Image: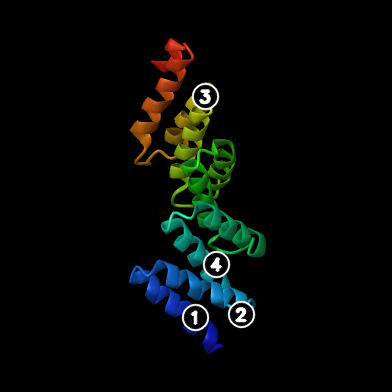
C-alpha cells in the first residue's frame, strides 16, 4: 500500500522541483512494479505529462494511448484525449488531432469543450477543409455562448468562407 504512494509522491515532488527525468522514472517504477496499485492511473497520466513537458512527443503519445486502453472509464480520460490531440496538432498530424478534438468537444460539461472545438476547427483549416472549418468555428458561439473564443471563432469562420469565395456567407 505504502510503496505505491511513496513512488507516486516522490515523482510528484521531483516534478515540482523540475526534475522531470527523475519524476518520469518514479512514475514508471510505480507503473511497472505495482501495476495494480490504485495510483497507477494517476502515475500514468503524470508520466505522460512529464514526457510532454520534456518535448518527448512520441513517448507522451504512447503513454496517453496506454492510459486510454487501460483506463477507459477513468475521470481523466477526456483530459488525456485533449493532451493527445494537442500533441498530434503540434506534430502536424491534423487528421488524427481533429478526430480527438471532436470527441473531447462533445463531452458534456467538460470545461475545455469550446477550446477543443476551436482546435478541431483549426485542424480542418490546416487540412484546407475551409467550409467544414468555417461551419465548426461558427458552431462555437452557438454551442458555447459564453465562450472566451466567441469573437475569435466568428472571425475565423468568416475567414474560412472568404477563402472559398463565399463572400455573402463570410459577411
Ranked by sequence position, the earlier of labels 4 and 2 is 2
**Circle 3 sits on which residue?**
128
Depicted 35 relative to depicted 152: above or below: below
The percent coordinates of residue 164 (x first, y second) are: 49, 14
Depicted 160 relative to depicted 99: above or below: above
Q: Residue at x 49, y 72 (%)?
A: 25
Identify the disc placed on residue 164.
Answer: none
Q: Please tell me how many numbered marks the rendered image carries.
A: 4
Query: Which of label 3 and label 2 is nearer to you?
Result: 2
Number of other residues with Cα within 10 Å of mark 3, as a class: few under 14, some 14 to 19, many 20 or more: some
The percent coordinates of residue 41 (x first, y second) are: 57, 69
Q: Residue at x 59, y 64 (%)?
A: 74
Depicted 88 relative to depicted 18: above or below: above
Between 84 and 142, the residue placed more toward the observer is 84
Report how far apart the C-alphas of labels 3 and 4 lie in the structure.
35 Å
Callouts 1 and 2 close, C-beta under 8 Å: yes
Q: Secondary structure at mark 3?
A: loop
**Circle 4 sits on which residue?**
44
Query: Which of label 4 and label 2 is nearer to you?
Result: 2
Ranked by sequence position, the earlier of labels 1 and 3 is 1
**Circle 2 sits on which residue?**
33
Ranked by sequence position, the earlier of labels 3 and 2 is 2
For the N terminus, the quadrant is bottom right
**Circle 1 sits on which residue?**
7
For the C terminus, the quadrant is top left
Ranked by sequence position, the earlier of labels 3 and 4 is 4
Amino acid at each position: 500500500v505504502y510503496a505505491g504512494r511513496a513512488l507516486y509522491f516522490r515523482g510528484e515532488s521531483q516534478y515540482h522541483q523540475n526534475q522531470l527525468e527523475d519524476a518520469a522514472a518514479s512514475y514508471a517504477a510505480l507503473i511497472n512494479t505495482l501495476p495494480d496499485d490504485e495510483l497507477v492511473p494517476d502515475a500514468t497520466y503524470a508520466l505522460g505529462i512529464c514526457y510532454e513537458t520534456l518535448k518527448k512527443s512520441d513517448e507522451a503519445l504512447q503513454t496517453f494511448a496506454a492510459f486510454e486502453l487501460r483506463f477507459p472509464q477513468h475521470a481523466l480520460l477526456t483530459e488525456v484525449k485533449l493532451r493527445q490531440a494537442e500533441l498530434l496538432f503540434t506534430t502536424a498530424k491534423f487528421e488524427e488531432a481533429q478526430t480527438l478534438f471532436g470527441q473531447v468537444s462533445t463531452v458534456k460539461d467538460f470545461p475545455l469543450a469550446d477550446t477543443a472545438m476551436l482546435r478541431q476547427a483549426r485542424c480542418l483549416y490546416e487540412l484546407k477543409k475551409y467550409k467544414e472549418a468555417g461551419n465548426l468555428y461558427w458552431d462555437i458561439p452557438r454551442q458555447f455562448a459564453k465562450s472566451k473564443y466567441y469573437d475569435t471563432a466568428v472571425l475565423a469562420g468568416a475567414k474560412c468562407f472568404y477563402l472559398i469565395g463565399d463572400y455573402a456567407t463570410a459577411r
